[in-house]
Image (cartoon, helix red, strand yellow):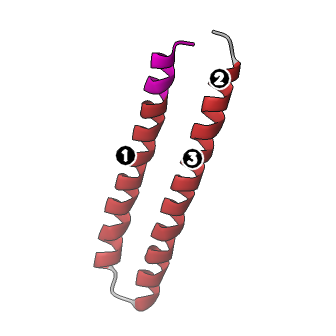
């Protein structure tokens, strides 16, 4: 596969991870602000931290495996 195509695929996946992180932050932050009880605030805060952590580590895992797959394959 051409190096340009690998870079494009890398940025497509990276953009998807960034957009997903922004969407998660925006929606869960609205829920945190609208929450009236301390348990709801804690729940949504922990959910936000866990989801963004999973997104970062999962996105990194996907990018590493995708790059490894593309570097081995002979397109």
Q: CA distance from mark 1 to mark 2?
A: 26 Å
Q: Which residue is mark 3?
A: 60
Horizontal placement of 74 versus 31: left or right? right
Q: Which residue is mark 2?
A: 71
Q: Is residue 9 above or below residue 5?
A: below
Would you say residue 3 sits in the magenta stretch?
Answer: yes
Q: Which residue, as the protein is rendered here, is positioned at the far right?
A: 72
| Image disc number at residue 53 | none
Q: Which of the 4 image quadrants contains residue 73?
A: top right
Q: Mark 3 touching mark 2, by CB under 8 A?
A: no
Q: Which of the 4 image quadrants contains residue 27?
A: bottom left
Q: Position of residue 49 (x, y in %)?
A: 48, 69
Query: Magenta segment, which residues?
Result: 1-9
Q: CA distance from mark 1 to mark 3?
A: 15 Å
The quadrant of the picture occupied by the C terminus is: top right
At horizontal 40% and vertical 58% (from top left) the residue drawn is 24
């Amino acid at each position: 596969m051409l190096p340009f195509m690998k870079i494009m695929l890398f940025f497509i996946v990276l953009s998807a991870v960034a957009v997903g992180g922004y969407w998660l932050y925006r929606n869960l932050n609205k829920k945190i602000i609208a929450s009236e009880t301390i348990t709801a605030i804690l729940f949504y805060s922990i959910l936000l931290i866990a989801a963004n952590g999973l997104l970062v580590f999962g996105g990194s895992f996907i990018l590493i495996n995708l790059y490894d797959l593309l570097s081995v394959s002979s397109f």
